Amino acid sequence: MTIEVGSQAPDFQLKDNHGRTVRLSEFRGEKNVVLVFYPFAFTGVCTGELCALRDELPRFEDEGAQLLAVSNDSIHTLRVYAEQEGLEYPLLSDFWPHGETSRAYGVFDEDKGCAVRGTFVIDKEGTVRWSVVNGLPDARDLNDYVKALEAL
């Protein structure tokens, strides 16, 4: 079941594409977080979405938000992917234990073995304030999450 708006966002500890540990709780009291789950690096819809986020990164920064993107790929795959696409925000690996964080947010597709397209806007206190979950083939509109951030 997907985490509901108004509930506390599950904390996590994941490695980013540079091997650094990132914890959601690091941002409490400091920044709002836009947490974006996506199925796989190097796929068409995912690349389109993540490159759109790259191109609009200043909008998130202007809102005082940290963008975090999570997939079930390994950190090695994510490092190459970020370099190839010029992605300067953290790509987090939910590779092992496989899908643990995706499951905690209710966006892991057990049949496919990957996260579906879930986005969660989390405020500075760690509360989910907005979310959208789309199936694997359905891209999200990043303007929706920018509007959610502006409403915080």
Image (tube, rainbow, N blue to C red):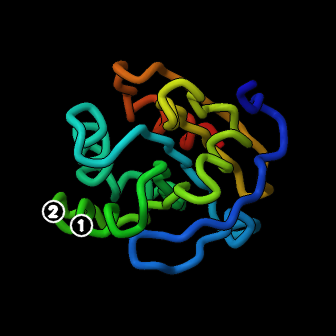
Q: Residue 79: x percent and y percent? A: 31, 69
Q: Which residue is mark 1?
A: 80
Of circles 2 and 1, which is in front?
A: 1
Relative vertical location of residue 65 with respect to residue 111 in this rendering, above or below: below
Question: The C terminus is located in which quarter?
Answer: top right
Mark 2: secondary structure: helix
| Quarter containing the N terminus | top right
- Secondary structure type for disc 1: helix
The residue beneath circle 2 is 84
Residue 89: horizontal and vertical position, in percent?
A: 38, 64
Which residue is found at the position 77% from the left and 28% from the top? 4
Vertical relation: 62 (above or below) 143: below
In the depicted view, which residue is nearer to us: 39 or 69?
39
Q: Is residue 99 left or right of residue 139?
A: right
Residue 91 location in percent, x, y? 42, 61
The amino acid sitting under disc 1 is: Val
The residue type indicated by label 2 comes to: Gln
In this rendering, the answer to whether 87 lies above or below 50 is below
Q: Say left or right for 143 vs 100.
A: left
Q: Determine whether, in the image, residue 80 is placed left or right of residue 118.
A: left
In this picture, residue 30 sits left or right of residue 113: right
Report if the CB atoms under discs 2 and 1 are less than 8 Å apart.
yes
Q: Is residue 30 above or below residue 120?
A: below
Write the residue at 41% across / 23% down.
Answer: 136
Residue at image position (34%, 69%) is 76
Crowding at mark 1 (Cα within 10 Å: few <14, some 14-19, many 20+): some
Instruction: Find the distance from the CA under tag 2 to the CA under tag 1.
Output: 6 Å
Residue density around tag 2, few if under 14, some if 14–19, many if 20 or more, within 10 Å: few
> Which of the pair 52/152 is nearer the observer?
52
Residue 32 percent location from the top left of the image: 63, 56
Q: Kindly identify the residue that appears in the image at 71 percent across and 27 percent down.
A: 2
